[in-house]
Amino acid sequence: MIFEDFESFRASGAAARVCVIGSGPAGTTIARKLAAAGVPSVIFEAGGEEWSEDSQDFYRGKTVGDPYFDLDVTRLRFLGGCSNHWAGWCRVMDKHDFEPKAWVPDTGWPIRRVDIEPYLGEVHDILELDAFRADVPISDDIRLVQLIKSPAVQFGVKFRDEIERSPLIALVLNTYVTELTGDGRRITGARISSRDRDAGTFVADYYVPCTGGLENSRLLLWSNARSNGAVVPNAAALGRYWMEHPQFLGGDAILSDYSIFPTDSTNEAFFSPSPAAMEARQIMNFGIRLIETPYGGVKQIIADLACVAPDLAEWTSAQLGQDLRCAAQLYVGWEQAPLASNFIRLSETDRDRAGVPRIELHWKKSDMERRTILEGLRLFGETLAEKDIGRVRIADWLVNGADYPTDQELAGHHHMGGTRMSDDPAKGVVDRNCKVHGVDNLYVGGSSVFATSGQCNPTTTITALACRLGEHLGGVAGA
Amino acid sequence: MALSVAADMSRRRLIQALLATTAIPLLAALPKDADPNAIVEVGGWILKRGDLR
């Protein structure tokens, strides 16, 4: 069932035991799992079926600290959410990503990878993935890993017809949950604004915000502010431990044989460190994306020269009427240390049209991360040299300790943390079942529950966690 | 002119020559019995010491 607004949904008399907020990968997956368990749910989607400037305006906000994307650009507020601009890159977080790193405070999840593995078959169907190839150790330190570039499922497109036919899922568009109300033990209702009008309160048995790694914190912070802490009673970590995957061009490589690594359809290969290497260097996880530019003959020589002497190579390349680049570029994306000092808070001065304070994101990369990118490139370079596979040149800005470049992509548009998972209510917002600590009927879906981020793109793990939460909630609500 | 010189050189020799240029300060301090397989970092390059000979 699909409704254009809350009024038409209410008039239909459709029932819902679970209120899912947001129709992105997490929200859609949870509602589908609930339907499979026979549990009726409603998905409130704040936007419409298509992108609109009017809807995106609700996502404007401010960033304090390191340069970051505009908050109304880095996410999407319409059916399918951020899956609408997802590139489709897939990998599940590794086993060691769930385990604590003794050298980094506040790492480790209360669950392990085996807890989401039973759902990976469903995830492969949802995201239309082939089986992952096993990692290939290149040395004791570095592994060739696979990152599948999937068809980039847009959840609103793929599942629209299924939802429309479903008697157990009511998708309600143009319906913004501005606030949850609670009594300190239970959520008592969701305040609704639909088509820019106050539409009253909707009551369900269970509530699951799935509005993304920024908006989940905003909704709960505002709900808590309005209820004097009765929505998230243990709020020490609420909005905190926010993380991204920063990424920069960190260097170049000359390879002795450009066919030595199997590259994908866009001539890219991916590498990550072994857990032992991370421990030895006392760093976080990282991923190196090696982008080969396949040249031959003299062009290859000049491209290799471009790694060593860019000015000379540019001149030589111009003589050939070519624009040749260093033949292998090394982009590095990495896992941030989870820090309480990276946080989301509510603006004291700026509100959206519904009166909800906008986000103020405080985010800064730490010294640990600087060490991670530098030591990561060293590990990779040492592996290539020891194995006589090639040689790596680390970029000048890294070697010289200069500031991060500002003319690059900056990060992956991966918004993680803010309602992180922990057994300790002082360190996390949700427990191992994604239930908010101390509240009987409030769960959270999406990457805001990530305790740490690993190095890989998050959508595959988000979808697996959503399958797990959907199944758990189906059991609880269906009992 | 530069193109014909580059085309006449083997890629390995060309790169070795260019790498060696950046490694002059290290070469000056290179002990004769240094392990050629030892990893060194010169001007951002991760090299084997033997690359510099």
Image: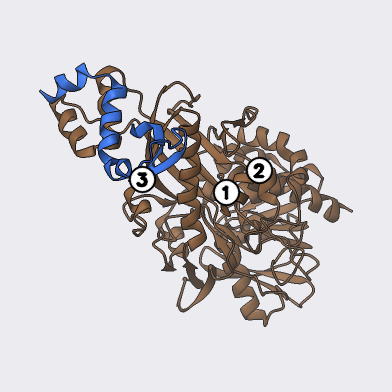
Chain colours: A brown, B blue
Real-space CA distance between mark 3 and mark 2, rounded to the nearest whole angstrom = 30 Å
x%, y% of residue A22? Answer: 61, 55
> Image height check: is A453 above or below A153?
below
Parent chain of label 2: A
State the residue in front, A255 or A327: A255
Q: Amino acid at mark 2?
A: Asp
Of circles 3 and 1, which is in front?
3
Q: Is residue A378 left or right of residue A5?
A: left
Q: Residue at x 62, y 38 (%)?
A: A161
* Label located before the other in sequence (1 or 2): 2
Q: Which residue corresponds to mark 3? A: B44
Q: Amino acid at mark 3?
A: Gly
Residue A420 appears in which quarter of the rendering? bottom right
Of circles 1 and 2, which is in front?
1
Q: Residue furthest front?
A: B32
The number of numbered badges drawn on the structure is: 3
State the residue in front, B17 or A170: B17
Real-space CA distance between mark 1 and mark 2, rounded to the nearest whole angstrom = 10 Å
Q: Mark 2: which secondary structure?
A: loop
Parent chain of label 1: A
Are the residues flagged by discs 3 and 2 from a single subunit? no
Circle 1/circle 2 CB separation < 8 Å: yes
Q: Can I make out residue A79 in this image?
A: no
Residue A94 marker: 2
